[in-house]
């Protein structure tokens, strides 16, 4: 901020400020155009990156009208793909190793819900075998993950 004092005598000061501003003084207004450009670029980057942050194994989940369940912590996710492959988070495991891996987690006192994601084209029997192994490992709080129905 600055102030100027005119040394001219006899001026009333009326309208003189307007004339003085035209004489090459700097404009102190904020130019928001670069800010808007940066925000639009960031918006596009996040819109492109958001689908890439989805959890784990790419599956075609069945569509339902069920509401999502609230969770406070990072859940354990078991996925069954259409070929019958079984994954804990993103690591592939066999059906025989599933019980031992989950028992190791249970030794640490895991009491949260386990989420089961299965491809809609996967074998029903394979999904039931995974559910049976999870139940046999001592986990009874099991949730099935689906995609919402498009309107």
Image: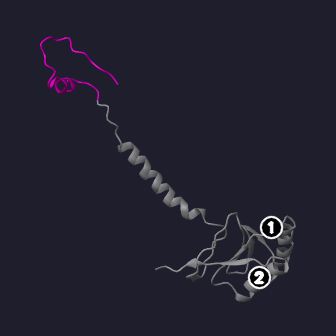
Where is residue 56? Give x, y as percent: 67, 67
Secondary structure under badge 2? Answer: helix
Determine whether 37 is above or below 74 in the image. Answer: above
Q: Residue at x 52, y 80 (%)?
A: 149
Q: Which residue is mark 1?
A: 110
What is the magenta range? 1-26
Locate residue 136: give its quadrant: bottom right
Does 25 lie within the magenta span? yes
Does 105 lie within the magenta span? no
Q: Nearer the viewer, mark 2 or mark 1?
A: 1
Q: Which residue is mark 2?
A: 131
Q: Are marks 2 and 1 in contact (CB under 8 Å)?
A: no
Determine whether 13 is above or below 141 in the image. Answer: above
Is residue 82 toward the left or the right of residue 32 in the image?
right
Where is residue 110? Give x, y as percent: 80, 67
Determine whether 67 is above or below 47 in the image. Answer: below
Determine whether 50 is above or below 29 in the image. Answer: below
């Amino acid at each position: 901020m600055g102030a100027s004092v005119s040394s001219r005598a006899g001026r009333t000061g009326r309208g003189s400020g307007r004339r003085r501003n035209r004489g090459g003084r700097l404009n102190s207004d904020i130019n928001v155009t670069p800010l808007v450009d940066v925000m639009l670029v960031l918006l596009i980057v996040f819109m492109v990156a958001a689908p890439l942050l989805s959890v784990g194994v790419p599956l075609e989940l069945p569509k339902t009208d069920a509401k999502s369940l609230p969770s406070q912590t990072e859940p354990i996710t078991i996925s069954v793909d259409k070929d019958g492959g079984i994954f804990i988070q993103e690591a592939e495991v066999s059906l025989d190793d599933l019980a031992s891996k989950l028992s190791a987690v249970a030794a640490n006192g895991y009491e949260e819900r386990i989420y089961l994601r299965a491809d809609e084209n996967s074998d029903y029997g394979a999904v039931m075998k995974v559910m049976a192994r999870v139940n046999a490992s001592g986990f009874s709080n099991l949730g099935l993950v689906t995609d919402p129905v498009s309107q």
